[in-house]
Image (spheres, helix red, strand yellow):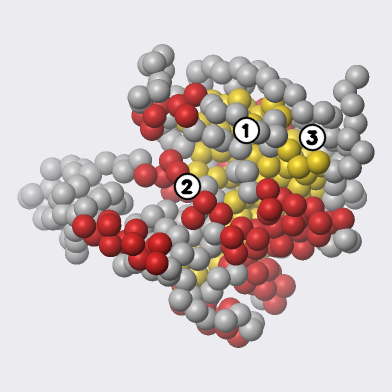
Amino acid sequence: MARKWRLPLLLVPLLLGPGLLHSSSAPPLVLNTWPFKNATEAAWRTLASGGSTLDAVEHGCAVCEREQCDGSVGFGGSPDELGETTLDAMIMDGTTMNVGAVGDLRRIKNAIGVARKVLEHTAHTLLVGESATKFAESMGFISEDLSTNTSRALHSDWLARNCQPNYWRNVVPDASKYCGPYKPPSILKQEGPSHKETGDNHGHDTIGMVVVDKMGHTAAGASTNGIKFKIPGRVGDSPIPGAGAYADDSAGTAAATGDGDILMRFLPSYQAVEYMRRGEDPTIACQKVISRIQKYFPNFFGAVICANVTGSYGASCCLTPSTHSNIVSDGRSSHLFSAEAFSKSGFILPFGKKCHISEHVKNQPAPRCLRHTSAAH
């Protein structure tokens, strides 16, 4: 029989092959994408001190915003085409089904905090752009420049590379060779797409967090600064309920990370919760969501984490060999990975890409490590 830890232990369940394992532990539970352990621990401490699931999600994501986790969360990362960093965030209460979210938030560092204010002080769900900033200021948030020397250097380097990569297509001048401004070609000159996906989303590490307390109450949230060099005004999946995250006390909670422009088309977090509502194990629910997206976009990059109200949890992600072609030798077009091996030190998946979830639970069995991979179907 596995030993039981006397104190809560922060682990890193790693996304491995679809040997459909699952993990279960009585709530409370804090689970988030990527190995952002400080965020996980902050959320756990909030629950342990008597805070609500919403408090835990807000405090956990706020840590990543302050620490600029992987440069993909918070200020000073992912400048858009004009060099500005903007933020997206969302928080959802699975007990009341209330949601607060912000998109394209400018000059405000604490995006998840502003999203919480939208939830608590308005009848709306999502505020965007400059108007979201004005709302934040009215709520007492300080307006300040989100750019840093790092983000300015990223933008300068991008301009020096003739604005490569970018997210334009079917425009003139040729977006694969030149900077804009761009315009649509005339009907006579239009010959089809001149620019394909950049593939630059593969290093994008949004924090998505799900929380289940000891009473089975759920909450979920996400925070990100989007993708590098996005077209100004772009909003990804993170602030969209059902896409970036979703929670429902009657079933469970889920969150997503990866290529937001693709993920948001499938509402993966909502779909995962609905699979769990039908009785699916969280790992299988996540895997089904990823498989559904792969039918249309076999080379997309993304992951979903899932937890039900009893404390079982799982995850699944898709990595593409095109991202790490120097490592891949089997020639398969894509792979599907499901959670569940546990290791403190980390585990390198095929293609050289780490794909983590971080979690905090009570009485978790001792760490174990298993590996199994297989092609997605």
Q: Are marks 3 and 2 in contact (CB under 8 Å)?
A: no
Give the amino acid at mark 3: Ser
In the rendered image, the vertical position of residue 233 relative to residue 72, given as above or below: below
Viewer-closest of 231 and 370 = 370
The mark tally for this picture is: 3
Q: What residue does disc 2 label?
A: 204
Q: Secondary structure at mark 3?
A: loop
Circle 1 Cα neighbour tier, 10 Å, few/some/many (<14 / 14–19 / ≥20): some
Q: Secondary structure at mark 1?
A: loop
Q: Are marks 1 and 3 in contact (CB under 8 Å)?
A: no
Q: Secondary structure at mark 2?
A: loop
Give the amino acid at mark 1: Gly
Of all residues shown, which one is farthest toward the top? 330
Image quarter of residue 316: top right
Residue at 27%, 56% in the rendered image: 158
The N terminus sits in image quarter: top right
Q: Which x, y percent locates residue 203? A: 45, 43
Q: Which x, y percent locates residue 28? A: 85, 46
Q: Nearer the viewer, mark 1 or mark 3?
A: 1
Q: What residue does disc 3 label?
A: 312
Q: In the image, 369: left or right of 215?
A: left
Q: What residue does disc 1 label?
A: 346
Residue at 22%, 44% in the rendered image: 195
| Label located before the other in sequence (1 or 2) | 2
Question: How much space separates mark 3 and mark 2, taking CA atoms?
Answer: 27 Å
Q: Nearer the viewer, mark 1 or mark 2?
A: 1
